[in-house]
Image (spheres, rainbow, N blue to C red):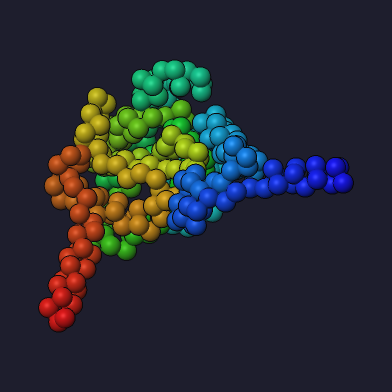
Amino acid sequence: MSKSKTTEQLKQQDTVHQDPWEKLRQFTDARIGLGRAGTSLPTSELLRFQLSHAQAIDAVHVPLDVDKLSEEFEQSSTLSPYLPIQRLHSKATDRMEYLQRPDLGRQLDKRSTELLQALGDEAYDLVFVLADGLSSYAISHHAKNFVELFISRLQEESTKPLKIAPICVVQQGRVAVGDDVCEALNAKQVVLLIGERPGLSSPDSMGLYLTWAAQRGMEDSMRNCISNIRPEGLKYQAAVHKSMYLLNESRRLSLTGVNLKDRSEDSLLETDQTQQFSLTKLS
């Protein structure tokens, strides 16, 4: 009898008490409504947290597989005119130096600069730069699909064909490294895709930075940024829609940065307001 009661008490102690906020978890990746086991987190939730933490660490330290990325790009007929990929490197020689010296990650090394300059003096309208940043997973998971969709939209909507430079991949690169690439190629615009700092629910978030007439020494206020590009965040189609608006406005105004506002959703907002006004009047 005594032993049976002890077993039952242990079972009750192991019971996870559900949190009333748990139903909200279907709308967010935030860690809410986790419940409790006694005064602690349930074991399953602790293990999920540890897994997410490990994935975030891996995202920072796992090197970008440029060979695999090149193979994926070569299989796309949309991207083939802008290949082979130009393999570049920042002045940060390895990952440890990259993390400790952000300034070196913002500049191309001498060999990479000479490689781009050797492509010729022909001016380009646009260059795509892929940089590993703080998450190689972001580029390996999303860059190919996003660039393919972006270039397809450019081909469909541009009245005048744009001269797009060969796609560049920069290892150990930060945002400003795109300025060096743009300057070396004498390009009008640079679209830089980079792995963003990983979070515990987003180890592969990709960011986009658009800069007009970029050159070394430009301030970050001269860029436009679109963040959290991934299927679980800002989806490819929505990100391309915003990017196309900013790209076209940038070409029209010959600028980017704080003076270029993202009004890509204004027409949708105006339509919604008109419909709401009409319904209000009718009622």
Q: Hey, which quadrant is residue 109 in on the image? A: top left
Residue 279 appears anywhere in the view: yes
Q: Residue at x 14, y 42 (%)?
A: 259
Q: Tell me the quarter of the picture where residue 166 sits.
A: top left
**Residue for point 46% across, 32% down:** 134
Horizontally, residue 176 falls left or right of residue 47, namely: left
Relative placement, left or right, of 253 versus 11 is: left
Instruction: Kindly give the residue lying farthest to the bottom in the view shown.
Output: 282
In the picture shown, does residue 93 fall above or below 158?
above
Tally the numbered discs: 0
Residue in front for this viewpoint, 157 or 104 = 104
The percent coordinates of residue 3 (x first, y second) are: 86, 42
Q: Position of residue 107 (x, y in %)?
A: 36, 24
Q: Work out whether residue 260 or residue 198 is closer to the camera in this orientation and state it.
A: 198
- Quarter of the figure with the C terminus: bottom left
Q: Which residue shows up at 41% across the image and 55% down it?
A: 235
Query: Percent x, y for residue 183?
Result: 28, 32
Q: Position of residue 142 (x, y in %)?
A: 47, 48
Q: Is residue 67 visible?
A: no
Instruction: Specify the farthest residue to the front.
Output: 1
Q: Is residue 182 left or right of residue 95?
A: left
Residue drawn at the location 50% of the way across and 53% of the way down: 20
In the rendered view, tell whether residue 248 sits above or below residue 63.
below
**Of residues 33 and 56, the one drawn nearer to the viewer in this rendering:** 33
